[in-house]
Amino acid sequence: MSYDETGDLRFFISLVDAGSLSAGARSLGTSPAAVSRRLARLEMRLGSTLVIRNTRHFGLSETGRLYYERALTIVADIDQLEEEISSSTNAPRGTLSIGAPVELGRRQIAPFIEAFSAKHPRLMINLALAPEGNYDFNDYLDVVLRLGLPETPGAVVTRLASTMRVLCASPAYIARHSMPTHPRDIPKHDCLCLRKNKTMALLNKWVIGNETETDVVMVEPRLSTTNAEIIHDWALSGQGIAYKLLCDVYQDLEEGKLVRILPDLQGEKIDLYAVLPTRQHTRASVKAFLSDLRPYIRTAGFL
């Protein structure tokens, strides 16, 4: 395969991912006219229409969809081959795509990536966020970080660390309502509950305890939402008691923006896993990412 052909594959992937000629031009740092000309040359070389385009629509033909899907695989294989050849003597290079839950990704993984990227300047890193890390796992992501044991047949699953849920509220809320001293006090307070994203089922059974005794506290929330970050924001603004992952609130606890309630007790323990396609776990970039991530997250609310 010639350099021009490889470049065409990368060009077409960028164009399709952008979703339009104008957006593709912006991502490629060129003009829509130049993108249109290059696409026309590619279609002429292949002898087939790849993109169905008019003033209102940009979509792939059947041939275009096949070309895009195969291009993703070919480019990933080329990047992996180059990385494997150079990994023994050079730093990680190529592209690394990571998926993570929204709040974990924004509060912990994004800051980590800043430092990791500075350490590996030849590596281009993509971070994709989804609620609770609910991705349909596919070859487009090299690493998916998930809280809770995933069911992903055919993938390599690695446990990285664990965290736990804690009860917390703002100092202003505690000043207005007093500090609970026993789990049975919690339902008497304003509580902030998460709901499942698709079913709207209320997650209002809060497990709290220690090594010898565990209570399941049923709460009726004053406020509820499907978004974990909104729960976090409500807790910070004094709206009530939240049952949050320690990894999400540890910094606010350290800074005094939130306070632990019943600090001698802890909620359910949840493990953090890295899920990788079987062919990705030997890549130098993946190994370096996970190797650096493990010690980092243990300073960020993980055990």
Image (cartoon, rainbow, N blue to C red):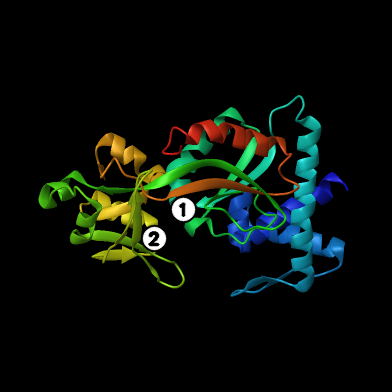
Please name the residue that numbered disc 1 is placed on. 102
Please name the residue that numbered disc 2 is placed on. Answer: 227
SS class of the residue under badge 2?
Answer: loop
Residue 134 image offset from top left, x and y in percent: 54, 60
Q: Is residue 77 left or right of residue 55?
A: right
Residue type pointed to by label 1: Val
Q: Nearer the viewer, residue 156 or 55?
A: 156
Density class for disc 1 (Cα within 10 Å; few <14, some 14-19, many ≥20) is: some
Spot occupied by residue 30 in the image (x, y as percentages of width and height)? 63, 51
Q: In the rendered image, which quarter is residue 118 located in?
A: top right
Q: Amino acid at mark 2?
A: Asn
Q: Pointers 1 and 2 in contact (CB under 8 A)?
A: yes
Q: Earlier in the sequence, mark 1 or mark 2?
A: 1
The kind of secondary structure element at disc 1 is helix
Which residue occupies 32% across, 61% down? 193
231 left or right of 43? left
Whether residue 279 appears in this view of the structure is yes
**Residue 15 falls in image quadrant:** bottom right
The residues bearing labels 1 and 2 have C-alpha atoms spaced at a distance of: 9 Å
On screen, residue 10 above or below 59: above
Above or below for 34 versus 273: below
Residue at horizontal 82 percent and vertical 48 percent from the top: 4
Residue drawn at x 60%, y 51% as measured from the top left: 27
